[in-house]
Image (tube, rainbow, N blue to C red):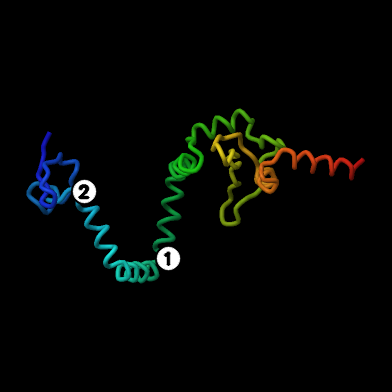
């Protein structure tokens, strides 16, 4: 395994700990990734107003390009983006989501209906929401928007839901 000594910290490290730099004879930067990260952090802390101003100006001037890039990227990486989002928010993979969806026959676990909300700008329907316990993080199932919001509005309280059900039954009977 090839190594190199970092010019900042003086520690000998593997080449994978250095960024690639094709302008250098070795093909790698002389300062390691950790030292570069620390340098960038300090630089931003001392120059954040200048950096923020420059970034704001750049993104304002290139707004349309950025929007098009994000839209194209999301379309071409839709599965990866959804997988990453599910892992980050609920701790499950896209495969696990699809298994839950299959076990529910593609419908809401509460009302048994498919999701009916569609996006205006896209010709696709919305996915069923991942219902989870907010205290434990445990996934309970997949719900349509109406059922998911309904449970949320009742603060995940089964007693309140039963009382609401009894209230509605009295009105009907």
Give x and y (percent) for residue 146. Answer: 69, 46
Residue nearest the observer in this picture, 118 or 14:
14
User: What is the quadrant of residue 60 in the picture?
Assistant: bottom left
Q: Residue at x 80, y 41 (%)?
A: 163
Give x and y (percent) for residue 78. Answer: 46, 45
Q: Which residue is mark 1?
A: 64
Bin the neighbour count of mark 1 within 10 Å (Cα to Cα): few under 14, some 14-19, many 20 and up: few
Query: Tag 2's secondary structure?
Result: helix
Query: Tag 1's secondary structure?
Result: helix
User: What is the quadrant of residue 57 in the picture?
Assistant: bottom left
Residue nearest the observer in this picture, 57 or 70:
57
Residue 87 appears left or right of 128: left
Give x and y (percent) for residue 153. Answer: 68, 48
**Figure quadrant of the N terminus:** top left
Give x and y (percent) for residue 18. Answer: 18, 46
Bin the neighbour count of mark 2 within 10 Å (Cα to Cα): few under 14, some 14-19, many 20 and up: some
The number of numbered badges drawn on the structure is 2
Residue 49 tag number: none
Mark toward the start of the polypeptide (2 vs 1): 2
Q: CA distance from mark 2 to mark 1?
A: 32 Å
Label 2–label 1 contact, CB within 8 A? no
Residue nearest the observer in this picture, 94 or 90:
90
Q: Residue at x 19, y 43 (%)?
A: 17
Residue 160 appears left or right of 115: right
**Figure quadrant of the C terminus:** top right
Q: Residue at x 38, y 66 (%)?
A: 59
Q: Which residue is mark 2?
A: 33
Residue lying farthest to the left in this orientation: 25
């Amino acid at each position: 395994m090839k190594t190199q000594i970092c010019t900042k910290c003086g520690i000998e490290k593997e080449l994978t700990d250095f960024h690639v730099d094709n302008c250098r004879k070795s093909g790698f930067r002389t300062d390691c990734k950790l030292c570069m990260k620390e340098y960038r952090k300090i630089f931003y802390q001392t120059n954040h107003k200048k950096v923020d101003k420059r970034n704001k100006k750049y993104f304002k001037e290139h707004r349309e390009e950025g929007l098009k890039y994000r839209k194209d990227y999301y379309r071409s990486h839709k599965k990866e983006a959804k997988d990453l989002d599910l892992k980050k928010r609920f701790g499950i993979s896209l495969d696990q989501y699809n298994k839950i969806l299959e076990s529910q026959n593609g419908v809401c676990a509460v009302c048994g209906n498919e999701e009916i909300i569609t996006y205006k700008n896209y010709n696709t329907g919305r996915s069923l929401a991942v219902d989870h316990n907010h205290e434990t993080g445990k996934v309970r199932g997949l719900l349509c928007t109406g059922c998911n919001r309904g449970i949320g509005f009742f603060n995940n309280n089964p007693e309140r839901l039963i009382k609401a059900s009894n209230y509605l039954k009295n009105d009907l009977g």
